[in-house]
Amino acid sequence: MFFNDQDIQMDTVDSNTTRKVLAHSDQLMYIKVMFAKAQTGEILLHKHVHEQVTYVLKGSFKFMIDNGQTKEVQTVKEGDSIHFPSDTLHGCIPLEDDGILLDAFTPARADFL
C-alpha cells in the first residue's frame, strides 16, 4: 500500500538511464525513469502489450510514436504527458541533462519486478 522512496531499489537500465518501480499492483504500476545526460541521434523504438501514460517531471524529451501508418515526432517538456496504446512502437531521447519521466503501465509490468 505504501512505497517509501528511500526503501526502493534503483535499477540501471543502461549507461544513461536508471529507474525505480514505485507504487504498483497487478493491474497498475508507476515507474520513475531518470536520464543523466542529454542525447542526440536516433530514437530507438520498442513496444509492449501494456498501455502506457508518461508524464514529464523534469526536462524535455523528443518522443516518437509509430502507429504502423504514420510516425509522429514531438518535443515534450515538464508538465506534458503522452498516451501510448498497447502494442504501439514508441521511444524517446532526453534533450537536457537530469531529465525525469513518470510512467504508468496497465497491467503492471512483471518484467520490471
Image (spheres, rainbow, N blue to C red):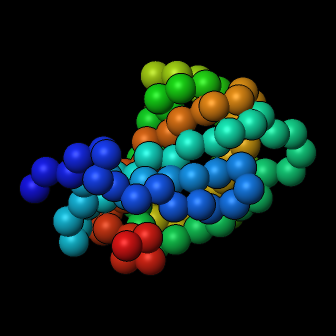
State which quadrant residue 73 falls in: top right
Residue 16 on image: x %, y %: 71, 49
Q: Quadrant of residue 111?
A: bottom left
- Identify whether 108 is placed above or below 36: below
Residue lying at the far bottom in this picture: please name it. Answer: 111
Between 56 and 45, the residue placed more toward the observer is: 56
Q: Is residue 83 visible?
A: no
On screen, residue 65 versus residue 100, left or right, reads: right
Q: Is residue 74 above or below residue 91?
A: above
Q: Position of residue 37 (x, y in %)?
A: 74, 37
Looking at the image, which residue is at 51% across and 61% down?
11
Give me the residue at 65% from left, 66% from top: 46
Q: Is residue 110 left or right of residue 90?
A: left
Q: Is residue 102 above or below residue 47?
A: above
Q: Quadrant of residue 35?
A: top right
Outermost residue toward the front in this view: 6
Residue found at the far left of this picture: 1
Say which quadrant the C terminus sits in. bottom left
**Farthest right residue?**
41
Image quarter (top left, top right, bottom left or bottom right) of the N terminus:
bottom left
The foreground one among 71 and 33 is 33
Q: How many marks?
A: 0
Q: Is residue 25 left or right of residue 42?
A: left
Q: Is residue 96 visible?
A: yes
- Estimate the x, y position of residue 107 in percent, counting from the top left: 30, 68
Q: Residue at the spot x=86%, y=51% of the render?
A: 42
Which residue is at 43% across, 54% downward?
Answer: 20
